[in-house]
Amino acid sequence: MQSRISKNRAGSMDEKTLSKEELIGLHVKIKECNDPSWNSKIGVIIDETKNTFIIEIGDQKKRIAKNIARFEFEVDGKKMMLNGSKILYRPENRIKKTR
């Protein structure tokens, strides 16, 4: 997966630091979701709001609520999970507010 995260930062990346990074453009897999039709879907995040991701899956753009799923990202070969309910912030505010 192509990543916009620098090599220096990727080596020390964990879930907490990933949650403070730009997620648009990253490949994502939905690992667990309250809506079973989303489980195991893979795509690229193309936009983000406070409560949702817009993910391009194939040739379709789908909107998923952050608070109903756990997302898996891979950065330089390292897989990391983010609980969507922990990143319910506008992308520009997430750096300051991530729990």
Image: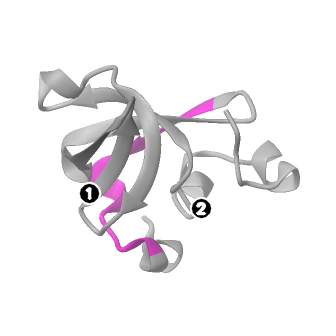
Quadrant placement of the N terminus: top right
Spatial separation of the CA atoms under disc 2 and disc 1 = 16 Å
The residue that label 2 is drawn on is 21
Residue 68, image x and y in percent? Answer: 18, 43
Q: Residue at x 51, y 56 (%)?
A: 24
Residue 93, image x and y in percent? Answer: 44, 79
Q: In the rendered image, is residue 29 in sight?
A: no
* Relative to 22, residue 94 above or below: below
Q: Residue at x 26, y 39 (%)?
A: 69
Extreme right residue here? 8
Residue 54, image x and y in percent? Answer: 32, 51
Amino acid type, mark 2: Glu
Q: Is disc 2 surrounded by few (<14), some (14 to 19) or many (20+) residues within 10 Å? A: some
The residue that label 1 is drawn on is 52
How many numbered tags mark residues here? 2
Does the magenta portion include 80?
A: yes
Quadrant placement of the C terminus: bottom left
The chosen color scheme is one colour
Q: In the rendered image, is residue 61 in sight?
A: yes
| Residue in the foreground of this view, choosing between 3 and 19 | 3
Query: In the rendered view, does 61 fall on the left or right side of 78?
Result: left
In magenta, the rendered stretch is 79-91
Extreme left residue here? 35
Query: In the rendered view, does 51 fall on the left or right side of 41?
Result: left
Amino acid type, mark 1: Thr
- Residue 42 marker: none
